[in-house]
Amino acid sequence: MTLTHNRPIADTAVATPEFEAANERQKRRRGLLLALPAYAYLVLFFAVPLGIVIVYSFATRNRFGGTDLTGWNIDSYTALGDSLVRQVLLRSITLAVITTVLCLVIAYPLAYYMATRRESVRNLMLVFVMIPFWTNFLVRNYAWYVILGTDGPLSRVTETVGIGETRLLFTQSAVVLGLVYGFLPFMILPLYASIERIDGRLLEASRDLYASGFQSFRHVLLPLSMPGVVAGSILVFIPSLGAYVTPEILGGAKTTLLGSYIVTQFLTARNLPFGAALSAVLMVIMLTATIVYFRKGGRTL
Amino acid sequence: MRTGGDTGEDRTVDNSAVDIRGVTKRFGDVVAVDNIDLSIADGEFFAMLGPSGCGKTTTLRMIAGLEFPTEGSLRIFGTEVGTLPPNKRPVNTVFQNYALFPHMNVLDNVGFGLRMQGTGKADARRQAAELIELVQLTGMEQRKPSQLSGGQQQRVALARALVNRPKVLLLDEPLGALDLKLRQEMQTELKSLQRELGVSFVFVTHDQEEALTMSDRIAVMHDGELLQVGSAEELYERPVNRFVADFIGQTNLLDATVLDEDMIVLANGTRVMAPNPHPAGTKVAMSLRPEAIRLGPRGSVPAEHEATSLPGVVAAMTYLGHALVYRVNIDWLELEVRTETVGAQDRLQPGDEVTLWWDRTADWVVPDE
């Protein structure tokens, strides 16, 4: 305000800082009212429950399976150092990484193929990629349960061919298979979107400048499609890490993953503080992975 | 050793940088390039000119290896390159809109070709810096293409191609995206750069003025066919057909029929003298450049031009400062006539009855295709 009083305001239409400031305030507030329902929804059903989870992680479990919201402590977090927990954590992360890498390797060539087709073919292929979403996720997992089962179609085929029966169900391989199957479209779509945006002449230019097909991929296509790689990897890694349905149906008892373990803590063991602490850890891992990936992607953009 | 051919193309095979023989390119049912023969000499500034869709860019892309010919033979310095991939050819391209790598800075863009060929990083950087200096972009090494102006991007594209010391440099409408003033500057620069390096430049453009001012020779293409190859002078003064006459510069095309080797009959029955090689009765067009026609009040034709004159009526006059442009009606056509203002005769007004005449050597008869 001191600025405005330093010079006299002429009666012509000179710039008046008060009006400009008012205008700026209005600009900042524009659309706030319209966004309010979404804000309210997120706060009520996302931020508040998240707060409750974090509060519970510092609470104490009482003898009767209930939770006392007194005597705050970090016992639940110390319990994370337990070897069983570490094993579950490590196994979950390993499977999520394997799933992400497999999705990337399978999806990239397909996304490139799709992005380089003519428009009608492209759109048709996009529809094909999204068709699985028309069926419930749970149903699709049970379909795999049937296919992979001891007496299922896959086993019969391998028996007929003479390789002998397959015992895939209730193994980690079955879990990875199910996860890759379930999350592949989340990798394909962002990859497709980012490859499709790349100017094909850049690849031609690289070939003209003596790059082999692989060098052209390595030095031009891959770096330029990095936003898609990052987005797709996050979209696959995060749900894989917290996956519950697929490991539960296809994994069996020996391969407990983080998602199932957390559910067990809440529902079976009735150890709410420990379940909450595990959830918090899971979120921290996801958040870290996201930030690291975005930073890395951001630099190559 | 001129052996003829429709296009007047020299059939020298040795010493040509690029030698194209009977090359056809089809995309499905579409014939993009139709059986062309072309030979580009080492060290030549060669332009390929034509309207969009005429096949000039496809021809360039076949030389680069970005398209393969459907039929025919394509040699670069005597080596058949028909289906060699682009990275195995001693040519480089300056792409339309440059196609600079957006994720690399200027230095890495320019050094790209060298690194792909296995040159060490330090060496590649040093050579890239030399080229950056040559195109006067020193100080811009660390910038991304998006931080450069159109003209600067153009120079980076040029440096990126030239750093590999190509035997032939291909340029696909490289000046198309620049504004007029910059384009004229770059024309001069490209020309002097080409002289300095002594490398063949093959330059694709739809801008005839650009082609005429820069090139040693020009190929005119239309609908996938090569119509004529020649110097700017040859194309302007002795076009092979109606399309070339019309496409290169401005001209008036008068429909006519050949009477004999010296005379033609214009569409309105006027006989004019026009030596031509066509048999009697051939439908032709007589090309008269606006600046080659002179005009004066009816009946003022000098006696020696009597056989090459036409009556007309002035329809309009435009004052351009250095010149006057008249639109003159002859029976079935309006002609454009351009006269210098310096030492001009009395200005004629619309409605004035006039006579047009021209030098016997000024007209040019082309087959009417």
Image (cartoon, coloured by chain):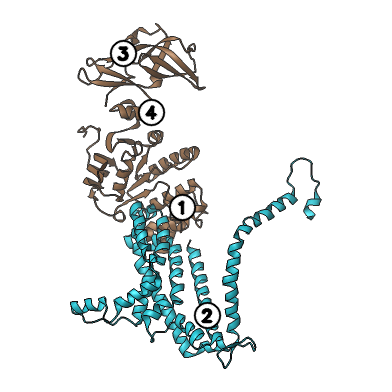
Q: Are marks 4 and 1 in contact (CB under 8 Å)?
A: no
Q: Nearer the viewer, mark 3 or mark 2?
A: 2
Q: Which structural element holds mark 3?
A: loop
Position of residue A89 measured from the top left corner of the image (x, y, whole percent) = 46, 83
Q: CA distance from mark 3 to mark 2?
A: 95 Å
The residue located at (51%, 88%) in the rendering is A81
Q: Amino acid at mark 4?
A: Gly
Q: Which structural element holds mark 4?
A: loop
Q: Amino acid at mark 1?
A: Ile
Query: Disc 2 marks which residue?
Result: A279
The cyan-coloured chain is labelled A
Dividing the picture into quadrants, the one containing residue A105 is: bottom left
The brown-coloured chain is labelled B
Q: Residues within 10 Å of mark 1 (few under 14, many from 20)?
A: many
The answer to whether tags 4 and 1 share a subunit is yes
Q: Are marks 1 and 3 in contact (CB under 8 Å)?
A: no
Query: Disc 3 marks which residue?
Result: B268
Q: Work out whether B40 lies above or below A224.
A: above
Q: Work out whether A240 lies above or below A126.
A: below
Q: Work out whether B183 lies above or below B248.
A: below
Query: Disc 4 marks which residue?
Result: B249
The chain ID associated with circle 1 is B
The chain ID associated with circle 3 is B
Q: How many marks?
A: 4
Query: Disc 1 marks which residue?
Result: B132
